[in-house]
Amino acid sequence: MKEKLLLTLACLFVSVGIMTAQTSKVTGVVTSAEDGLPVVGASILVAGTTQGTITDIDGKFTISGVPATAKTLHVSYMGMAPQDVSIKDGVLKIVLKSDAKALDEVVVTAMGIKRSEKILGYASSTVKNDDLIAAKSGSVMAGLSGKVAGLNISNSGTAGSSQKVIVRATLLSPTINHCM
């Protein structure tokens, strides 16, 4: 009886060792190509699975339990070109390039319907890029403040707080046209 219990425990430990050998731990750091600074909050996903994580304040990430069959990571961040990286041993060094695209025209309607300014059946306000730059504000929202009728932008006044944007609906459903 004692021998069977020892044999069963030995088989259990061997099988656990084999199962953990089929997964690995992937670590890396994500930086920006423009300035070499760490990218905070970049999304890292193991291709073909639902496993993933985001980078910390130093641009570092760790994903445990990555299947041995996984070959690539998909790395993405808003404003940067997504990149697929091969999984290798050691610390992965991933450099993301900027994906800045010139914004030609954005039309925001009260109902969230995307339309070209030319086909709108009502008047729209236009704010040009030069007007935003002349304001010399820290953000686009602060640059829009006071330049569009019916647009109310407010924040709580504390550092790092979000801004609240209210577009007042009128009979003609006002539109903000923002060109950059």
Image (cartoon, grey):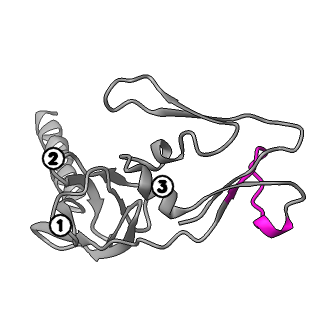
Q: Which mark is residue 13?
A: 2
Q: Quadrant of residue 24?
A: bottom left
User: Is residue 81 shown left or right of residue 111?
Assistant: left
Cα–Cα gap, marks 3 and 2: 65 Å
Q: Is residue 19 in sight in this rendering?
A: yes
- The residue singled out by tag 3 in the image is 132
> Looking at the magenta stretch, what is its main secondary structure?
loop
Camera-side mark, 1 or 2: 1
Q: Which residues are magenta?
A: 107-119
Mark 1 = which residue? Answer: 35
- Determine the secondary structure under disc 2: helix
Q: Are marks 1 and 3 in contact (CB under 8 Å)?
A: no
Which type of secondary structure does the marked residue at label 1 adopt?
Answer: loop
Which amino acid type corresponds to the residue marked 3 in the rendered image? Leu
Q: Nearer the viewer, residue 138 or 19?
A: 138
Residue in the image at 78% along x and 63% along y:
115
Circle 3 sits in a helix, a strand or a loop, which is it? helix
Given the image, on which type of amino acid does mark 1 rest?
Answer: Asp
Q: Left or right of 161: which side holds 122?
A: right
